[in-house]
Image (cartoon, grey):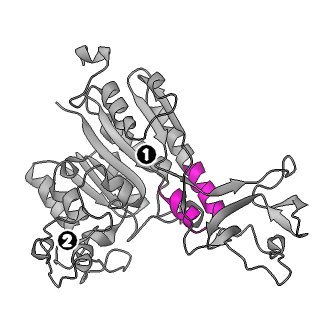
Amino acid sequence: MIRIAGIVTTTRVTHASPAGAYSHSADRDWESDADVAAACHADAADATDVADGVAQDDIALQLIHSHPGNKFKVILGGGRREFLPNTTRDEEGATGRRRDGRDLIAEWRADKHARNATALYAWNRDQLMAAAATRPDYLLGLFEPSHMQYHLEADPRTEPTLAELTEIAIKSLSSNEKGFFLFVEGGRIDHAHHENLAQLALDETIELSAAVARATELLSEEDSLIVVTSDHAHVMAINGYTRRGGDILGPSDDIGADGVPYMTLSYANGPGYRAHDDAGRRGDVSQENYHSVQFPFPAAVPLDSETHGGDDVAVFARGVAHGMFSGLYEQSQLPHLMAYAACIGPGPHAPACSGA
């Protein structure tokens, strides 16, 4: 028996970070065959017919039919449109994007049934809870045509939380005696920052924290390793000299040299830029509805989308071999450390692996 795997994300399951767990692609945006054809200026209906010598299965197709994605026991997130034909509407009335006419959700079911395995698909929270209760061999949940909704804007009756998805995934995978690997992503933190929507970004971070807390409740430190990190930083700043206990979403009690209050949170760049008046004064954002979840926090440089930051990011670890995750090191070291602790891969393994 070998270790099994799964992915959980609040983005499309074919988006860049989750796709890195199972796909090989020349372009992160080639999520469906329509993307491959469009990128190569082809009229082909199938990725294998694409012009300019490109012959690559799109990311969604790889997830359903190629190793290792087709072995994943749990796949939970958004992105139904990448799996459905552009002539088909999904359960919520949204049109698919595939040009090849293939229904990859149906193909996923057929593939698992051909292996004499139980496989259940869910597109809303109630279906997911019912499906998970039966403990199928394979579980696929796609809860939005594109990315899942931001937590503060989602309908909790129809859309599961990241913590719920994480719990279901862990319980589904824990039945394997040899253990499992689970990728969990709070991917909409990044999206909110790109729009300077700090309130949504902070709330999505809280949702990720809740998912980590749920995982720590379900997994023992004696036989599991939880690693929490980010693939990059953002350029949001928490400004100083605000009063203790002040509103993190509100303005400081202090004012800038131009006589205008500044927000506790702001960005180095992004769509939240406000033009200055002729005297060089900023707009007074304290007069705006800064508690709206769609309020774009101030940015110093106007950009359509806020950039990533160059800061080092933190890595937190709990459980087996957690002590190795300390100091400063390159991001590429993380999978080697995890493989060492989990006794997998061609590299060195922990001493305890001899009995694994």
> Label 2 sits on what residue type?
Asp
- Specify the quadrant of the image occupied by residue 50: bottom left
User: Is the C terminus in the top left, top right, bottom left or bottom right quadrant?
Assistant: top left
Q: Which percent across, then down, holds residue 164?
A: 46, 49
Residue at disc 2, secondary structure: loop
* Residue plotted at (54% across, 70% down): 305
**Magenta stretch, residue numbers:** 187-207
* Residue plotted at (41% across, 22% down): 321
Q: Which percent across, then down, holds residue 197?
A: 63, 66
Horizontally, residue 178 falls left or right of residue 111, namely right
Residue at the spot of label 2: 103
Residue 129 in view here: no
Within-10-Å neighbours for mark 1: few <14, some 14–19, many 20+: many
Residue extending furthest toward the front: 279
Q: Which mark is residue 166?
A: 1
Which mark sits nearer the N-terminus, 1 or 2? Answer: 2
